[in-house]
Image (tube, grey):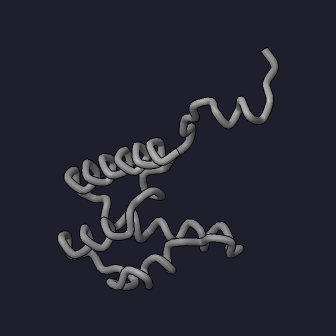
Amino acid sequence: MSINIELLKRLPKVELHCHLDGSMRIETILDLAQKDKVKLPSSKFEELRKALIIGDNRVTLEEYIDRFDITLSVMQTPESLKRIAFELIEDVLKRMLDT
């Protein structure tokens, strides 16, 4: 069997490296921060999204890592971790079903 690009596109894929703290929904961060009284850089969705998403911007490693202070701040209870992990699996399933 020869391997070509079409075959590679059709084959199932798996996530080999995924960080829970880098995969959170912004809505969840806002909700958990409010519930656990955690101070965020902003309580507005779009402002927080801009603070978290790097996109095509080039930043230093330190600037990149600083963003995790935000996500880690709301990951400090077992209940929060369960919710975040559950939502990550929901998001992965949704992406799988959309392809």
- The residue at 28%/59% (across/down) is 76
Q: Quadrant of residue 4?
A: top right
Which percent across, then down, holds residue 58? Answer: 71, 73
Which percent across, then down, holds residue 25? Answer: 38, 63
Q: Residue furthest top?
A: 1
Is 56 placed above or below 19 here?
below
- The residue at 48%/58% (across/down) is 22
- The residue at 30%/65% (across/down) is 28
Which percent across, then down, holds residue 92? Answer: 43, 46
In the image, is 25 to the left or to the right of 54? left
Is 60 placed above or below 23 here?
below
In the image, is 69 to the left or to the right of 73? right
Residue closest to the eye, 26 or 78:
26
Is 17 placed above or below 48 here?
above
Residue closest to the eye, 7 or 44:
7
- The residue at 58%/35% (across/down) is 13
Is 61 placed above or below 44 here?
above
